[in-house]
Amino acid sequence: MNAPAIPDYYAVLGVARTVTTDEIKWAYRKIVQKWHPDRCKAPGASDRLVAARRAYELLSDAETRRSIDVLLAVKERSVEPRLPHPDEVDRRTMRGNVLTTHGWLARE
């Protein structure tokens, strides 16, 4: 089963995962100062601000932050399934079987 797609909220704020809540608040305020639509007329500034606000809201709550840390850890450890290299497959066992992303499955 694949890990759920979750953005790295720490990267959105530009902080490490080991930061304190006060450092998260400081990083969020710096982003607001830089990307606020009244100060920055660059395209996408409001999108960055919305993403930073969402990251700040989620990482400020200790329980939600723990959940995000767990999900990010699972995402980092997950490995995409791979198909076997043709040299690794015994041709005699392939006959009548179905190739899937997890390997060969026997047809019933």
Image: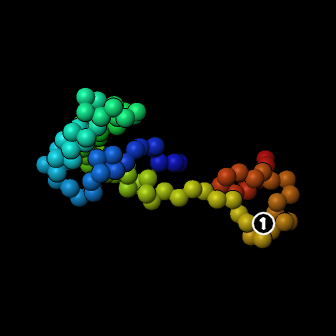
- Residue 22, image x, y percentages: 13, 49
The percent position of residue 66, horizontal first and vertical second, equals 26, 48
Which residue matches tag 1?
86
Residue at point 17%, 44% (across, down): 25
Relative to the observer, which residue lies in front, 68 or 101?
Answer: 68
Residue 7 quadrant: top left
User: Residue 51 location in percent, x, y?
Assistant: 33, 37
Snapshot quadrant of residue 50: top left
User: Which amino acid type corresponds to the residue marked 1 in the rendered image?
Assistant: Pro
Q: Is residue 30 left or right of residue 86?
A: left
Residue 48 appears in the picture as rendered:
yes
Q: Quadrant of residue 94?
A: bottom right
Q: How many numbered discs sit on the rendered protein?
A: 1
The image shows residue 59 at horizontal and vertical percentages of 24, 44
Between 31 and 98, the one nearer to me in the picture: 31
Instruction: Indicate left or right for 94 with 101 as reference.
Output: right
Can the viewer see residue 58 in this picture?
Answer: no
Q: Residue at x 41, y 43 (%)?
A: 6
Left-right relation of 8 to 57: right
